[in-house]
Each structure stands twice: as structure tokens, then as C-alpha cells.
Amino acid sequence: MSLDKNTVAKIAKLARIRVPEEDLEPLAGELNTIIGFVEQLGEVDTDGVEPMTSAIEHEMFQRDDVVSDGGYPDRVLANSEHANMGFFTVPKVVE
């Protein structure tokens, strides 16, 4: 896949990024280099390799799921102009 100047201009417009005309050609070259590198990664044989979330093996710290604050819904609902039966109420937005 190769990006040309017009495609880069269209991508910039869709992303709402202002790119000066003289920067489109160099940016196309840089993006093509990045895409080429990503395509190279697709060629790597990863059969038998387990997915990982980190390069270092470690266990995620887990804490007990306990309520440490709360238990006073009336005080929380006092912040709302529209509360009903212990819940926040909001105006309908979909017909």
C-alpha cells in the first residue's frame, strides 16, 4: 500500500489536521515508511507464541473489592435537581 499526496491531504482533512501543501509530500513519504514497517511486522511468524501484555512477567496487583466510601445516597442525590425514587433522572434524548 502506498500513499500519495492527495490521499494524505484527504486523511488530514478527515482527521481535522491542517497540513500545509508543501508538507504533504514529505508526510506521505514518512507515512509510507511507517506502513512498510507495519507490513514487515505482519510477516513475522508468531505461531506458538503466547500473547503478552508486558515484556516482564509479573502478577497484577489486585485489591479486595470493598466499598470504602458511600452509603449515603440522599447526600449524593442532593446534588441533582432531578432525582426520583433514589435515582438520578435525565431528560429523554432519543425519540
Image: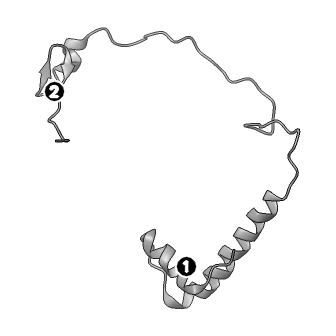
Q: Secondary structure at mark 1?
A: helix
Q: Quadrant of the N terminus?
A: bottom right
Q: Which mark is on residue 8?
A: 1
Question: Mark 1 near mark 2, Cβ–Cβ under 8 Å?
Answer: no
Q: Is residue 49 left or right of residue 86?
A: right
Residue 33 in the image, given as x and y percentages of width and height = 73, 74
Colour setting:
one colour
Question: Can you tell which of label 1 and label 2 is closer to the viewer?
Answer: 1
Residue sticking out furthest to the left:
81
Q: Quadrant of the C terminus?
A: top left
Residue sticking out furthest to the front:
95
Q: Residues within 10 Å of mark 2 (few under 14, many from 20)?
A: few
Depth check: 41 or 29 in front?
Answer: 41
At 50% from the left edge and 81% from the top edge, which residue is drawn? Answer: 9
At 48% from the left edge and 9% from the top edge, which residue is drawn? Answer: 66
Amino acid type, residue under disc 2 in the picture: Ser
Residue position for label 2: 80
Amino acid type, residue under disc 1 in the picture: Val
Q: Is residue 67 left or right of residue 85?
A: right
Residue 18 in the image, given as x and y percentages of width and height = 44, 78
Residue 79 in the image, given as x and y percentages of width and height = 18, 25
Residue sticking out furthest to the bottom:
22
| Tally of marks | 2
Q: Is residue 33 above or below residue 95?
A: below
Q: Is residue 94 above or below residue 15?
A: above
Q: Is residue 5 left or right of residue 38?
A: left
Q: Is residue 17 above or below residue 48?
A: below
Q: Quadrant of residue 7?
A: bottom right
Residue 39 in the image, given as x and y percentages of width and height = 76, 64
